Image: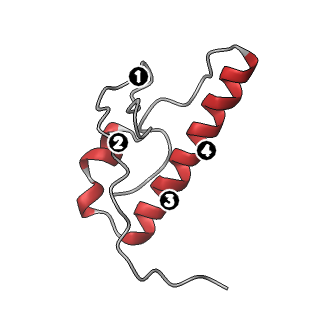
Amino acid sequence: MEQLEFFALPNPCVGVCEANSKGYCKGCLRSREERQFWLKMSEAQKRQVLRLCQIRRRKLQQAAERGQDEEMPQAGQMGLDF
């Protein structure tokens, strides 16, 4: 069963607005396109972006635990349609 959303999804920006070498924001891990179109996205698209950011953060944490640089896909290759 899907939970109803009663509140608008907040912007995940944490004020660290600098892109890493793969094109993701170092603070929120959104791609340039995900940051640029956030206000125009539907709630479903925003939820998808937040899920992708969680996945990206987990991959970075796992790589850090192994002492490696994690290879993430280049920003824009995640297949979101805005």
- Residue at 58% x, 82% y is 3
Instruction: Say which of marks 3 and 2 sits in front.
Output: 2
Tell which circle, 1 or 4, labels the residue nearer the N-terminal end: 1
The residue nearer to you, when weighing 38 against 18, is 18
> Mark 1 or 3 closer to N-term?
1
Q: Quadrant of residue 43?
A: bottom left
- Marks 1 and 3 sit apart, C-alpha to C-alpha, by 21 Å
Q: Earlier in the sequence, mark 3 or mark 2?
A: 2
Q: Residue placed at 31% from the left, 43% from the top?
A: 33
Q: Nearer the viewer, residue 80 or 21?
A: 21
Q: Nearer the viewer, residue 37 or 65?
A: 65
Task: Count residues near mark 4 (Cα–Cα under 10 Å), then give few for <14, some for 14-19, many for 20+.
Answer: few
Q: Which residue is pictured at 42% across the width and 18% down the height?
A: 21
The kind of secondary structure element at disc 2 is loop
Q: Residue furthest front?
A: 14
Badge 1 vs badge 4, beta-carbon distance below 8 Å:
no
Q: Which residue is mark 2?
A: 14
Spatial CA distance of label 1 from label 4 is: 16 Å
The residue where tag 4 is placed is 55
Residue 77 percent across, percent down from the top left: 48, 38
Is the residue marked by circle 1 packed among few (<14), some (14-19), or many (20+) residues within 10 Å?
few
Q: Residue at x 50, y 44 (%)?
A: 78
Q: Which residue is mark 1?
A: 20
User: SS of the residue at dot 4?
Assistant: helix
Q: Amino acid under label 1?
A: Asn
Kind of element beneath mark 1: loop
Q: Name the disc covering residue 48, or none.
A: 3
Q: Tag 2: residue type?
A: Val
The answer to whether 23 appears left or right of 37 in the picture is: right
